[in-house]
Amino acid sequence: MGVERAARDLKTIPREADWAVTPIDPHDTLLGQWVSRPAGALIRMQEPRLLLFGLPFDAAVLGRKGSRGGPQAIRVAARTLKLPPGLDAIKGAARDIGDVVLPNSVELAHRHAESFVHKTLLMAGHYRKGPLRCRSVAFGGDHSLAYPCIKPYLDHLGSDLAVINLDAHLDIRQVEKGKPPNSGTGFGRLLEAGLKSYTVIGVRPFQTSAAYLRRARNYRARLISAEDVFEQGAVAVAKNVLKSLSRNCRFIYLSVDVDVADASVAPGCSAPTPGGLLAHQVFQLVRFICADRRTRACGIFEFAPNLEEKNSDRTARFAAGCLAEML
């Protein structure tokens, strides 16, 4: 069976999401109570303002596997979050269309994910110009999925698109001849495809080879280290990044690799390392960037629940906090 035919034969209706939760305290309002779970395809839905979908896939990860279990683990951690005053707008607006069914083949999974993102966002009116109509959030899976998640926007928007990546690594490796893409190649592929604005926040010493630093500079990528965030403050960094974007930027994709956080904050990922950002700094960055109305799509990647420390859900709670800030 050819690749194209196999891609067409894949299921297109995602597996249903599970946000079911009952508050222990009747005074609590929990996020899980306000995320709807429509059955079937998005085409049956009215245009949502907040669109969620899971990507259970880790066949392309360079390190330890497990991020295919990320989507539902994030839901479990996020559904018990208590909503503070002022977030009533989420009620009836946040819709989770479930987990996209992806095969183990990297090539097939990427083709299917890209097609799914394009068709889903097209039906949601996501490509329209003008004020923000819908924000989408993809979560779970390895960071190779950044390519199929962002490519439809790049094809549609060209130089009007800016990508901001919170990550300890640059992920701009080149795909080796005869081998499939991996979790370190996603943004390199996007730059090769014409992405003009790429910013990485949280880069760490001893985590990136000099060759990739040179490649990033050749593409005029903006690199901001974890030390820069510590010295300048997360809000100041976010302000400077947003201010530096091109005048014609009208769409921002925010990608969060959970390994941007220190290993003490997010041990449950493929490559936890010391020297990373603290949870409140990541939350501030996400909150400030998502307050910009140009930020219309986000992704959370690399959370692997099987790699959590024993009897701990520390990384799940961190990833859930990122999701809540995006919403």
Image (tube, rainbow, N blue to C red):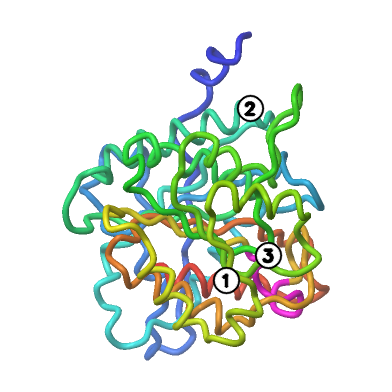
x and y percentages locating residue 277 in the rendered image:
64, 78
Q: Is residue 219 above or below residue 179?
A: below
Residue type at mark 3?
A: Ala
As drawn, the label of residue 77 is 1
Task: Determine the residue positioned at 58% across, 80% down.
Answer: 229
**Circle 2 crowding by C-alpha within 10 Å: few under 14, some 14–19, many from 20:** some
From the image, give the main secondary structure of the stretch colored magenta. Answer: loop
Viewer-nearest of discs 1 and 2? 2
User: Looking at this rendering, what residue extends furthest in the left direction?
Assistant: 130
Region of the chain picked out in magenta, as a range: 258-266
Give the label on residue 107, or none: 2
Which quadrant is home to the N terminus?
top right
- Apparent side of residue 204 relative to residue 126 in the rendered image (left or right): right
Q: CA distance from mark 2 to mark 3?
A: 25 Å
Give left or right: position of 52 versus 111. left
Depth order, front residue of 272/233: 233
Name which residue type carries label 2. Answer: Glu
Q: For the residues marked 1 and 2, what is the alpha-carbon distance in whole angstroms?
A: 31 Å
Residue found at x 53% / y 63%: 75
Q: Is residue 170 above or below residue 83?
A: above
Q: Residue at x 38, y 82 (%)?
A: 83
Would residue 300 appear left or right of 90 to someone viewing this image?
right
- Residues under numbered marks 1 and 2 in contact, where contact means CB atoms less than 8 Å apart: no
Q: Which residue is mark 3?
A: 168
Place of residue 125 in the rendered image (x, y in percent of width and height, measured from the top left):
23, 44
Q: Is residue 324 magenta?
A: no
Relative side of 230 to 79, left or right: right
Tell me the mark number nearer the camera, choosing from 2 and 3.
3
Which quadrant is the C terminus positioned in?
A: bottom left
